[in-house]
Image (cartoon, rainbow, N blue to C red):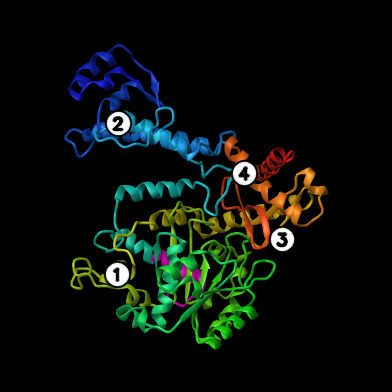
Amino acid sequence: YFPFFDLDKEQMRKKSVHTFESTEKDIFFGTLLTDLVVYLFFPLDLLPSKDGQDLTESFLLHVVDILLHYIQKTFDVKSKVLDFHHPHQLLEGLDGFSLELSDHPESLEQLLVDCTDTLKYGVKTGHPRFLNQLSSGLDVIGLAGEWLTATANANMFTYEIAPVFTVMETILLKKMYEIIGWGETEGDGLFSPGGSISNLYGILTARYKQYPEIKRKGMTVLPGIVLFVSEQGHYSVKKAAAILGIGTDNVIEVKCDERGKMIPAELEKNILQAKRKGQTPFCVTATAGSTVLGAFDPLQDVADICERHNLWMHVDAAWGGGLLLSRNHSYKLSGIERANSVTWNPHKLMGVPLQCSAILIREKGLLEACNQMQAGYLFQPDKLYNVDFDTGDKTIQCGRHVDIFKLWLMWKAKGTSGFEAQINRYMELAKYFYKVLKKKDNFKLVLDAEPEFTNVCFWYFPPRLKHIPKGFERDQELQKIAPKIKAQMLEEGTAMISYQPCGDKVNFFRMVFSNPATRQTDVDYLIDEIERLGKDL
């Protein structure tokens, strides 16, 4: 804190001359005191203010210093994954960090302190021991892409506003169609705000394809339609049904085998039962990489059934889509080329910074027919360029964030082979983790077979539980173990890993590998940490 922060701006400027003459150098946020003039000013002094160029440069360099310091800490395994505080502590304020908003502008100095504190009390999702989510890691090229995107501050609805970005999206979508296996004349799509919205697009388009009149006349013209998803499918399918007026009761969950894969015979049976009840099936959502168990539905079998019953086939490959880039593992998505629509999230397995999700539709023109409203102030047909690049009328949004550049830049940096190597390494880590756990008598795998994906699910048994016979009593105790270990991990900030129940299985840990910073040593550390925190429970 400097006393001249209490002065008004004119006084500050006068006083700063005397204050800074007496000292040659000092360090604050990693910069020289001669640069500290930034702390004497307010946001209104930045560009586009007259003579604001030098101050703007100084301020942004301070921000970059803060970010670089944070990035270095993120990749340091000795640093904490997080400095945990409860919600009420953040609401009340911490060590001068207040989330309350003022009616008056605050100084640039205070804003820089707020930037530092925001990162300090958040989670380092790029930390090598952050293993909590399907989307993790910090790719520096992707980060640079996100910075540039924010600087450009463009909107993806028309070519005239985002000429480079709209063409980039076209090129990348075409690449993704090819990887899926669609023909040259097939494929349409866009990038959306996450996999749940992409799944919504898939179901919305499926319904429009079967019943185009719904766009004008609404739900009253429809029969009692139903759709199908595996019992391990993502909850966003039910959300989409609720949003679209189909209703969650009309989402029929199909039984899975012990690995979490949809059973084709059960799907066929459910379709026939629905028809006998007078319901009208229209769509099946298959899963390629389920959230918890990492299961891949048998897509060829599902496609056969969809063709037999004339049903739209949507594949939720939000998590597993990246495996298409691996020649060693892409066979697990065999049949995806027969899908009518696909959700694929590069912000998961491919490590692109959030958010980056694509909805891909095999039939050209369908997405626009379903969603277009031809707003005259945006989508004029007589513009000076090819208006096919005005993609905004395909979307359910108007404004759309630029999610494409960071992926494009990363693809340029890595090449397809770079993504492949990264994904293959995740698969090797999962295999290593599985083999280590298999040899330990105080860990038990949820699935005995070698992992099909990077998900590895397991229980930890403290010594006292090993002597309790399998059954209700032991399950009641085992249910409490993962949450207690996770709570201690959070409080100490040593690592992050998720847990959940699933079906009749009580709480277990789910390890997922999608963080490029994670190494075998981090895997070994996590096992030791679980044992350390759990042995006396």
Residue closer to the observer: 239 or 366: 239
Q: Which amino acid does label 2 sit on?
A: Leu
State the separation of the CA atoms marked 3 and 2: 54 Å
Front: mark 1 or 4: 4
- The secondary structure type at the circle numbered 2 is helix
Q: What percent of the width, then of the height, locates residue 309?
A: 53, 86
- Residue, far top: 22
Q: Name the residue under label 2.
A: 108
Q: Which amino acid does label 3 sit on?
A: Leu
Residue closer to the observer: 148 or 311: 311
Q: Which mark sits nearer the N-terminus, 1 or 3?
A: 1
- Residue, far front: 473
Q: Which mark sits nearer the N-terminus, 2 or 1?
A: 2
Q: Name the residue under label 3.
A: 447
- The secondary structure type at the circle numbered 4 is helix
Q: Mark 4 points at which residue?
A: 486
Q: In this view, does 531 lie to the left or right of 495?
A: right
**Residue drawn at (22%, 16%), measured in percent from left and top?**
15
